[in-house]
Image: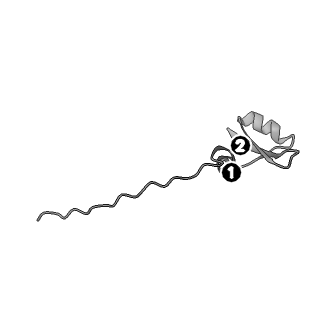
Amino acid sequence: MKTIKKMNLKGEMEYKRVNDSEGNNLTRVGWSFCPKIEWKENVRDFGKTKEEKPKKEKIKKEKAA
């Protein structure tokens, strides 16, 4: 699988996930390869907020001698 991108007529970036052979064909007609992380941030995870879980306090146990 490859991630490709292209600027559409509205000036917005358009992303696609395609197989390798289709990706090679589309790069010949104006699409370009982009890192998968760029696709994740701009498409898959767009608008999601990262929830932080409260950290648990670690309790140290003393060894019995």
State whether residue 2 is above or below residue 42: above
Q: Quadrant of the C terminus?
A: bottom left
| Picture quadrant of residue 21 | top right
Residue, disc 1? 38
Image location (x, y in percent) of residue 53: 45, 54
Give SS at disc 2: strand
Q: Residue drawn 71% across and 43% down?
A: 3
The spot of residue 43 in percent (x, y) is 68, 45
- Of pointers 1 and 2, the one earlier in the residue sequence: 2
Q: Nearer the viewer, residue 35 or 45?
A: 45
Q: How is the image coloured?
A: one colour
Residue type at mark 1? Glu
Q: Secondary structure at mark 1?
A: helix
**What residue is shown at x 78% (from left), y 38% (from top)?**
24
Name the mark nearer the viewer: 1 or 2.
Answer: 1
- Amino acid on which disc 2 is placed: Thr
Residue position for label 2:
3
Please tell me how crowded label 2 is: few (under 14), some (14-19), or many (20+) other residues with Cα within 10 Å: many
> Residue 7, position in %: x, y?
83, 47
